[in-house]
Amino acid sequence: MGRFLMTPTLVRHHPSAASARTGARAYARARDWAEIQERMLVPLYEAVYERLEVGAATRLLGLDCGAGLALLVAASRGAHVTGVDADPAFVAHARGRLADDGAPGDHPGSVVCGTPADAVDGAPYNLVTAFAPIGCAGGDADGLTPALEAAVPLVGRGEPVVLTGWGPPERCATSAVLRVATRLTDSPRASGPGGWRPALRDDLEDVASRSGLKPDGSGRVACPFGYGDMDSAVRGLLSTGLFDAAVRATDPAQVEKELVEALHPHLRPDGTVWMPNVFRYLIARKP
């Protein structure tokens, strides 16, 4: 990503019971997200930043920032960026990535670990992003509303808050693969939210309304999922967390087996896996 004008900073939530994973398994999952899956959404990041003219005047707060790639893309445009994520393994990857690619020196201002409300380091933010797409699993927006409620007070009136979600199922080839999670979670052993559901037209607007935000434009972006081989495809998809309930309901080997079967129609003669998808973003503003 090159050298940046300012060193980004990262804030993390206190980990919840669902996201607190430790040891090699948690690190491997975060690594797979960082190395395989996160890049699939780069067209979405770039489209949003281009539309909002993200640059040196931007003070960005990224919610559920994962391994920090969206922060890097914004920082490469000169933005002052701060990220928040609930998973300590992802936070560790993001911190390492930002330190490796950021410019030397300390970030101006202070950052306190905790919720978005603790991420105050001077002037208000003028952009909040939530790039973890919602709308493909039951209950996947439940954690976003409280995060937004904590973040919205940190932006000025009229400033943009960006929400993202999956596009219509008929335009997302990965939707058929995600149905594996629903089939495998139809079991007495399944617990917690999970399982694929079709994205609804007003998913993002509903979250914005619950958070007291006013919609002010939207867009769709093609984000194909492309993998070098079947193993990378399986690892990348598992790193999203969308199959966690299926793993709890059955076992990792069964989930991987059924994923391979579901991915087979998308396997190309050269061994790569390719699935065209469309994602949606909503620009909402603080009234």
Image (spheres, rainbow, N blue to C red):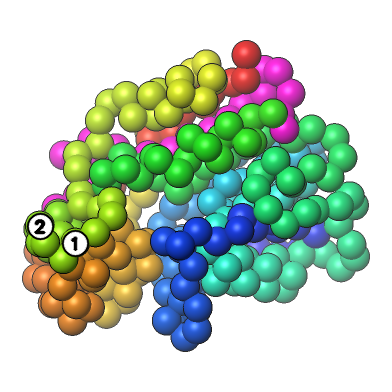
Q: Position of residue 32 (x, y in %)?
A: 43, 74
Q: Which residue is mark 2?
A: 186
| Residue farthest to the bottom, as pictured | 24
Marks 1/2 in contact by CB < 8 Å: the verdict is: yes
Q: From this view, report whether residue 52 is shown above or below residue 228.
A: above
Confirm whether residue 44 shows in the render. no
Which secondary structure, mark 1? loop
**Please, what secondary structure does the residue beneath circle 2 have?**
loop
**Label for residue 131?**
none
The amino acid sitting under disc 1 is Ala
Q: From the viewer's perspective, tell me whether residue 72 is left or right of residue 58.
A: left
* Rendering coords of residue 63 (x, y %): 58, 46
Whether 133 is drawn above or below 182: the answer is above
Q: Is residue 31 left or right of residue 93?
A: left
Which residue is pictured at 44% across the width and 33% down the height? 281
Magenta-tinted stretch: 154-176
157 part of magenta stretch: yes
148 vs 63: above or below: above
Which residue: 51% across, 25% down?
211
Distance (Cα) linking label 1 and label 2: 7 Å
Quadrant of the snapshot with the N terminus: bottom right
Residue 117 in percent (x, y) is at 70, 41
Residue 254 location, quadrant: bottom left
Residue at the spot of label 1: 190
Mark 2 residue type: Asp
Kindly identify the residue that appears in the image at 49 percent across and 45 percent down.
Answer: 131
Observer able to see residue 280: yes
Q: Is residue 63 above or below residue 162?
A: below
